[in-house]
């Protein structure tokens, strides 16, 4: 459990298996005559139930960012290094890495100009020329 929490960026399955084992151990301390088959049944029920009902909430809280934090790329402005016709593809630098980008607008984007990200398509971003975005004014 400790290794998964501290060193591995896993999905918290081992944490709930370990927590179920600890709870069964506490139950056996409370009643030493608790049968072995009952311990296995209790362990299985606790492990499955805790994963189903609590894993996603815990994972989102610990690994998914703060409440209300939007990590979306939509709306960000990027600079385009080459001419990109409507429907054309290029690469843009954003957040320290390069992304594939598709011009989904009806206007070509000139080299050295800025474009706004309007959506995602798989691992690529969809961009439009800044002048094509009515919110730019």
Image (tube, rainbow, N blue to C red):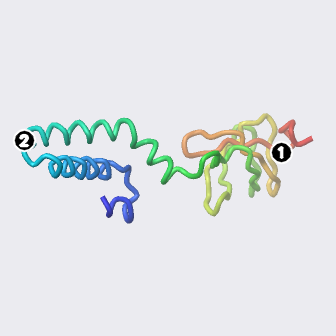
Q: Is residue 63 left or right of residue 67?
A: left
Q: Is residue 1 left or right of residue 70?
A: left
Q: Is residue 104 left or right of residue 36?
A: right
Residue identifier under label 1 = 130
**Residue 85: which numbered mark, if any?**
none
**Could you tell which of marks 1 and 2 lies nearer the N-terminus?**
2
Q: Residues within 10 Å of mark 2 (few under 14, many from 20)?
A: few
The N terminus appears in which quarter of the rendering? bottom left
Residue identifier under label 2 = 35
Q: Is residue 78 above or below residue 126?
A: below
Assign a secondary structure to mark 2. Answer: loop
Furthest residue toward right: 137
Assign a secondary structure to mark 1. Answer: helix
The C terminus appears in which quarter of the rendering? top right
Which residue does the image show at 65% across and 59% down from the upper left? Answer: 95
Which residue does the image show at 32% across and 63% down from the upper left? Answer: 3
Q: CA distance from mark 1 to mark 2?
A: 70 Å
Percent position of residue 59, x then y: 44, 48
- Front-most of residues 114 and 83: 114
Which residue does the image show at 79% across and 46% down from the upper left? Answer: 109
Which residue does the image show at 61% across and 61% down from the upper left? Answer: 97
- Front-most of residues 51 and 115: 51
Percent position of residue 16, x then y: 31, 48
């Amino acid at each position: 459990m400790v290794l998964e929490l501290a060193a591995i960026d896993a999905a918290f399955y081992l944490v709930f298996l370990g927590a179920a084992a600890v709870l069964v151990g506490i139950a056996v301390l409370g009643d030493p005559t608790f049968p072995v088959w009952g311990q296995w049944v209790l362990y299985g029920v606790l492990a499955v139930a805790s994963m189903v009902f609590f894993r996603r909430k815990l994972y989102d809280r610990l690994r998914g960012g703060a409440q209300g934090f939007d990590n979306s790329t939509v709306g960000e402005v990027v600079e385009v290094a080459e001419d990109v016709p409507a429907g054309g593809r290029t690469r843009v630098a954003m957040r320290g890495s390069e992304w594939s980008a598709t011009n989904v607008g009806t206007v070509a984007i000139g080299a050295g100009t800025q474009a706004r990200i309007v959506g995602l398509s798989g691992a690529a971003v969809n961009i439009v020329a800044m002048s094509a975005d009515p919110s730019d004014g």
